[in-house]
Amino acid sequence: MPIGFAYTLIVLLIITSALLTMLVLLHRGKGGGLSSMFGGGVSSSLAGSSVAEKNLDRYTVLVGIVWFACIVGLGLWLKLEMAAGAVS
């Protein structure tokens, strides 16, 4: 596989890592979390969670899946490159 594939995955991994960190910090904890600073704590709740919190959960899971796919993709790329280097 070309080296550009690895660089693309590395850049995507860095972006998703920063985004995932931000999204996790935005979640409401026992004390309200950072999400209450941005208006997340003022909404009325339906079944214990607001629409903003549900969307935040969805975005966090989506970014987590992309982050995980980048990790697996880089691992597979590295394995293929190591196997190709051993054969040469």
Image: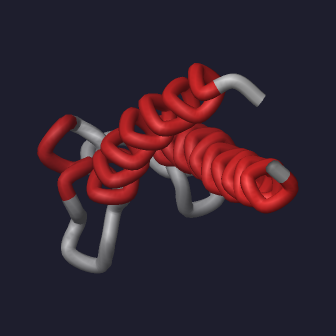
Q: What's the residue at 50%, 29% (across, down)?
A: 7
Residue drawn at x 59%, y 34% is 6
- Tell me how many marks there are: 0
Position of residue 17 in the picture relative to residue 88 (left or right) = left
Camera-side residue of 26 and 83: 83
The residue at the point 78 percent across, 53 percent down is 76
Tell me where residue 47 sits by quadrant: bottom right
- Relative to 46, is 35 on the left or the right? left
**Can residue 65 be seen in the rendering of this structure?**
no
Where the N terminus falls, by quadrant?
top right
In this rendering, is residue 75 above or below 3? below
Give percent across and percent down for residue 8.
Answer: 54, 25
- Camera sees residue 77: yes
Which of the 4 image quadrants contains residue 62? top right
Give residue 82's position: percent from left, percent from top: 72, 58
Query: Where residue 28 sits in the image (x, y, percent)?
Result: 34, 62
Q: Toward the viewer: 65 or 75?
A: 75
